Image: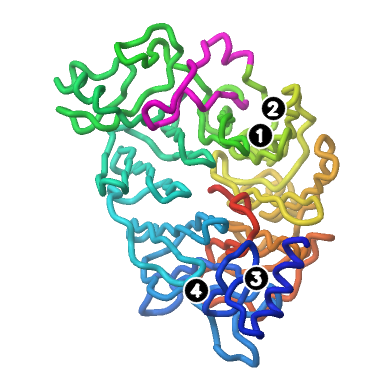
Amino acid sequence: MSAAAALIVAAGLAGCGTTSYFAGRNLPPSGLVNRVLIAIQNPGSFSKGALQFVDAYYDRRSGFKGVPGGFSISGYSSSLPITIQNMPEEQLGAVYGSGDGSLVPISYGKESTSGTLSGLNGLSSSVFITRNQAYIFAASQSNHVFTVVDRSTSASYPLSLPGVYRVSVNPGGTMVLAFVQNSNYAYYPVKLSAAQTIDYSGGPSTWPKAAADCEPQNAPTWCLFQAQSPDHMDATGTAYGAPLAFDRPVKAVFSADGGTAYVLNCGPECGGSAASVSILPVAPMIFLNAQASGTLPTNATLASTTIAIPGGASNALVDASTLFVAGQQPQQIGGQTLFAGNLTTVNLSNNTTSAPVSISDGAPGAPSRMLEADNNTLWIAMTKCNNGVRAATGEAYGCLTMVNISTPSAPTVTLLEPYLGDATGIAAVTGLNKIYTAEGGQVYIYSTTDGTALDNQYVTVTGTAYDVAYMDATTDANNTVY
């Protein structure tokens, strides 16, 4: 039985008293089994944030015959929610509030939250919790710290890294990369063993030679390392030497097994030289002691596994042996530099690329959203598409692109018009041939069969809809990995 059929059967059984549905998940209090969660900013004069969800089967925000009048996550009161980290396999979400720096876990099974997670240092420009909820990793660009929250000990470790602004975490939550704005380097944290803690108990003068920072200083528990070529080894077998140089790296995406990192080098759209993707093994950078193995590649090896992406590289999505890379290419229009959006397909079995195809323009270096949906479609959401080449030259433009990827090496692009504002969220309602989006602060629905807009009048919200997530997706891959 398909996942979609299972959900439909579950919906029918809900009226017969069953308390579980797809994959053994508990039937939630609302009784809905196709829920899309919406992060809403300023929903009213007395609240700066709310989390509402809608029935994505019938595309309604209310229950049968209007009772109840709406559905929401109970207990949520944070300010200006901006991202939803969607983990449907764990029946969990994590919502970050940009107004108060809060990270709030959401129980999809209970449709409630138990409060804000502690340990972050100020406002975060990027934050993730591992799927097992054991660790939180965050970048605070304003405070210049990369923070590790070890929830097993309820301890927080702020590691100094000026300019840090993004973090990327692999699917298993065993390896993290941190990126500094306008830098050509990447960093990763390591949790030291008890023996290593003794080795480094003297403080800064005896830190590992490759470490950018270690905390606490007198008895280090966590160290932040700059990715190094293994020119030398310290007493613990940690590699150090010449740093691995990238070209304005902004993000990493990972293979499904979490064992390979694809570092996106933003290049010209971020003030660098050339856009590319660098392939790194994850094993040497796993953060728990005794799990790491192997050595980091030498600079020569790194060069042989760096793939040029002429269309730009600021976001990507991995699908088996194919990597879809979205980015912006600078062009001179009327005496000013503007950017044009492109999608490049990389065949990871032989590291070859297809010719870039034109997609929606967007803000250079800004994190777009990418998500696969039904009918072999890939959806890409951009911001500031009204400032790109298309708008400047009088072409039709919009911030949302649908791509047919039935033939990955030759994707077919459909640009969605008209311009509705920044596209900040996508949720693939798999099995039902539709997606939900947040565009211009409102919720929209599209068919994945032909890209047509569906009736959204019963899912619109009061306030600014900023992100959306399909709570009842079959896998954690149904996540835009902001």
Q: CA distance from mark 4 to mark 3?
A: 23 Å
The answer to whether 253 appears left or right of 287 in the picture is right
Q: Residue at x 75, y 51 (%)?
A: 394
Question: Is 369 situated left or right of 167 in this image?
Answer: right
Question: Relative to residue 344, is residue 296 depicted above or below?
Answer: above
Whichever of callouts 2 and 1 sits on the residue coming sooner in the sequence is: 2
Q: Choose mark 4 or mark 3, whichever is in front.
A: 3
Which of the two labelled residues, at mark 4 and mark 3, occupies the earlier sequence position? 3
Name the element at disc 2.
loop
| Other residues around mark 2 within 10 Å, as few (<14) / some (14–19) / many (≥20) | many
Q: Which residue is mark 3?
A: 34
Label 4: few (<14), some (14–19) or many (≥20) C-alpha neighbours in 10 Å: some
Distance between the alpha carbons at the discs numbered 4 and 2: 39 Å
Contact check, label 2 and label 1, Cβ < 8 Å = yes
Front one among 311 and 100: 100
Tell me the residue that label 1 is attached to. Answer: 329
Q: Amino acid at mark 1?
A: Gln
Q: Who comes first in sequence, dot 4 or dot 2?
A: 2
Q: CA distance from mark 3 to mark 2?
A: 40 Å
Q: CA distance from mark 1 to mark 4?
A: 34 Å
Q: Amino acid at mark 4?
A: Gly
Residue position for label 2:
310
Which mark is in front, 1 or 4?
A: 4
Magenta-tinted stretch: 276-304
Can you give x and y, in whole percent of width and height, for residue 337 in the image? 61, 36
Q: Which mark is residue 463?
A: 4
Q: Which SS class for mark 4?
A: loop
Residue 455 sits inside the magenta stretch: no
Residue 114 appears at what percent x and percent y?
36, 67
